[in-house]
Amino acid sequence: MQKVNINEVVKVMLNMQDKGEAVTLLGIGPMSKTLLKACFELGKEKDFPLLFIASRNQVDAAELGGGYVCNWNQRTFTQTIAETAAETGFDGLYYTCRDHGGPWQRDNERNDHLEEELAMQLGKQSYLEDLINGFDLLHIDPTKDPYEMGKVVPMESVLSRTIELIQYCENERKRLGLAEIGYEVGTEETNGGLTSRETYETFIQTLNSELEKRQLPTPTFIVGQTGTLVKMTENVGTFNSKNAQELASIAKQYGVGLKEHNGDYIDDHILLQHLPLGITATNVAPQFGTEETRAYIELAKVEEQLAQDGLIEHKSNVEYILTLQAIKSERWRKWMVGDQRELQIEDIFQQKELTDKILDIAGHYAFNHEEVKAEIQTLFHNLRQCNIDGERFVINRIKRSLNQYVECFNLEGSTTKIMKEIGVEV
């Protein structure tokens, strides 16, 4: 299928809202190769566009520290996506997107309190690799400021850094002779300041004015705070439909789509409201990693029973190894609440309930560990001997989770609808 610029897709979607054909796009955190396969299979079956949103911690250049997902850098990430699309026979629309790009967006950069000049330089270096490797959308997010922890980052700082980074990316894009790309601005973080209607509109107005002066493109998406917040494996925020509707309406006035982050673990009755409220896209990431983890644990239970029945001789140790490496990763801390963030690793192993919680939250951070991969393969081998396709079960389990959003966001058949609106026959 002919690739269409993501800016054009969003413009068409905003028009479709007025025709009673609203669609909310799904931004998918690429937690594993298995998730990519599930996405492409479902995308082919249900005919909807795929957006893969990779944070700098997940996917980044090796010289900047690489990524915890499959050790992917930008090149291997885009290659794997293309290969998986081909393997599954997917011929629809998909977009490779940078999520939370910019200064201090890697944990180590923020923890080390890098000076602003160096942090901006590293953010630009990461964006350059994104551009070289064909990313379609770049999230410009300079709000993770270690010197403003717990405070609202001044709008002047957010604006000046945003403009500087877009200017850099556009200069490099043109120098490399690359096609136009989309930009996402703003953040769902409360310290980014874009939480109220007034602040949101002022930010868009000021940013667009400054971009126009410099002959730079206006954003494709602007992130707004709709009240969602993920902790543990729950959405502990309170969805604010009034605020979401106001922010979406403001964004649309400026030809921009409202992007919601933290869309994980949301009930259907809230997801269904996204269409009438005008939310153009929603990002979901840890939920799909958790679903994959839960699938492995379910299969481990089956393997255990079959071993007790004498049908498996040497069972895997997948649950223990996955738990061990998930805890050792320490990436679970960001999802915990209260004093649990400060727990010592040795204390965690003494509490079964807590280790189970951390496995549920953070198992996906350990998928690429060599021991974990080996145990998963042993698990699959054992189950194959008993006529169970474990890998297929995992893929289908992820597809079930993805399909909740496909159904609620009116995504089925949306690629064909969007392409027809653009004037391209499918």
Image (cartoon, grey):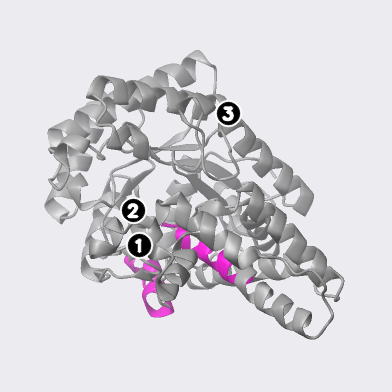
Residue 253 is labelled as none
What is the span of residues highlighted in magenta in the rendered image?
268-295
Residue 156 placement, left or right of 133: left
| Three-letter residue code for mark 2 | Leu
Against 399, residue 417 (above or below) is above
Q: Main secondary structure of the magenta part?
A: helix
Which class describes the residues within 10 Å of circle 1: few (<14), some (14-19), or many (20+)? Answer: many
Residue 218 placement, left or right of 396: left
Q: Earlier in the sequence, mark 3 or mark 1?
A: 3
- Which residue is the site of mark 3? 133
Residue pictured at 52% horizontal, 43% vertical? 68
Q: Position of residue 130 (x, y in %)?
A: 50, 30
- Which residue is the site of mark 2? 258
Q: Earlier in the sequence, mark 2 or mark 1?
A: 2
Residue pictured at 53% horizontal, 72% vertical? 404
| Three-letter residue code for mark 1 | Gly
